[in-house]
Image: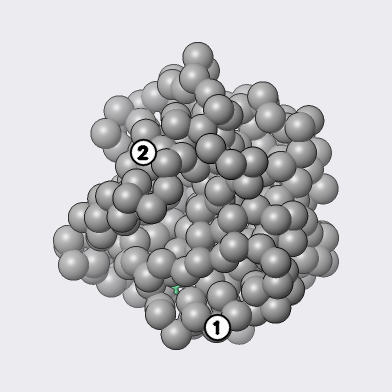
Amino acid sequence: MTNTKIAIVAGGTSGVGKRTAIDLAKKQVHVIIIGSNSQKGETALQEIKAEAPTAEVEFIQADLSRRQNINQLATQLSQRIDHIDILVTTMGGLFNHYQETADQLDLNIVINYWAHYWLITALEPLLTAAPQSRVLVVGALPTIVNHITPHLPELHPKVQDYNSNRVSTDTLLARVLMVRGLADHWQNSTITVNLFHPGNVPDSSYGAESNLWFKALGQILARFSTKNSNVGSRLALEPAFAKQSGSFYDDKARLVPWNKKYTLALAQQLLAASA
Ligand SMILES: NC(=O)c1ccc[n+]([C@@H]2O[C@H](COP(=O)([O-])OP(=O)(O)OC[C@H]3O[C@@H](n4cnc5c(N)ncnc54)[C@H](OP(=O)(O)O)[C@@H]3O)[C@@H](O)[C@H]2O)c1
């Protein structure tokens, strides 16, 4: 094993993921970015290489909306690398209307929750193969994360009266509970898993098809966040964060206390339903 750390950034072709990939590459981490759009991926690759010319950076095209693609990706990765030090899952999307994936699942739920869960669990063997590995899952502003009414997220929404904002909130809560549940599950392992608020990354395609009201809200919320924060790479690399697991960090890498109602019991219920 060389000293160069290996990071997988799922959703690394734009927005939060690309920002994190650039910051990691600048620290000489070997970065592999994943996205479904080849052209976007190649453009992002050139951009990251321009910012970090001496780093090893690769792009792998994979549509993470299908579990079988995720399993194939895990196999492909295990043929290329023997461990993963850092896994960052930032893929996301906000689709106003109900859209089905090839597996007849709701696209909003798949991209914002299932793909994170499937990918993290599929890559567990490679994460375990590193001396110490860190998984970072994208969250949102602490005031949003901690003000969702605690409940078991609805992972099979009704097509009638479809409300994409409600579904999006449920998937954020699902990621919160997943982080808490996986941290507990891995408490005696060498894998840590944490949620982070990425700050304000303006170079994003998230919510591109949303209405003006949503975009205006996004601009207001952005004022409360650090622009192009390097929080992802700090949490991935700094020794101070090596052992902490099951936590939530803001865009300045400060610990944010969880809403106490996001209990471990609720997290375990979600993981049992997800498995
Ligand atoms: N941007 C911000 O300031 C900000 C602030 C707080 C929270 N967040 C959260 O961060 C998350 C990501 O937002 P973002 O701004 O980074 O969005 P973004 O710019 O749209 O990036 C989304 C990433 O997900 C990938 N992706 C989407 N569908 C995919 C699929 N089927 N298969 C593989 N990859 C897929 C995209 O790649 P392809 O298009 O190539 O598939 C892209 O790399 C969201 O949950 C958002 O709420 C963002």
* Category of crowding for the residue at label 2, using alpha-carbon neighbours closer than 10 angstroms: few (below 14), some (14–19), many (at least 20): some
Q: Residue 85: name its quadrant.
A: top right
> Residue 72 location, x and y as percent?
25, 55
Residue that sits furthest to the top in the current view: 188
Residue 33 in view (yes/no): yes
For residue 182, side relative to residue 139 (left or right)? left
> Residue 33 location, x and y as percent?
51, 63
For residue 22, side relative to residue 42 (left or right)? right
> Residue 199 location, x and y as percent?
74, 58
Where does the C terminus fall, quadrant-wise? top left
Find residue 13 and name its label. Answer: none
Find residue 121 and name its label. Answer: 2
**Where does label 1 land, which residue?**
43
Against 39, is 34 above or below?
Answer: above
> Residue 233 location, x and y as percent?
71, 51
For residue 252, side relative to residue 73 (left or right)? right
Find numbered disc 1 in the image and state the secondary structure of the residue it sits on: helix
Which residue lies at the image location 76% right of the left edge and 38% below the top edge? 238
As shown in the figure, which amino acid type bears the numbered disc 2? Thr
Against 204, is 223 above or below?
Answer: above
Q: Residue 237: name its quadrant.
A: top right
Which residue lies at the image location 40% right of the left edge and 78% below the top edge? 37
Which residue lies at the image location 36% right of the left edge and 38% below the top edge? 121
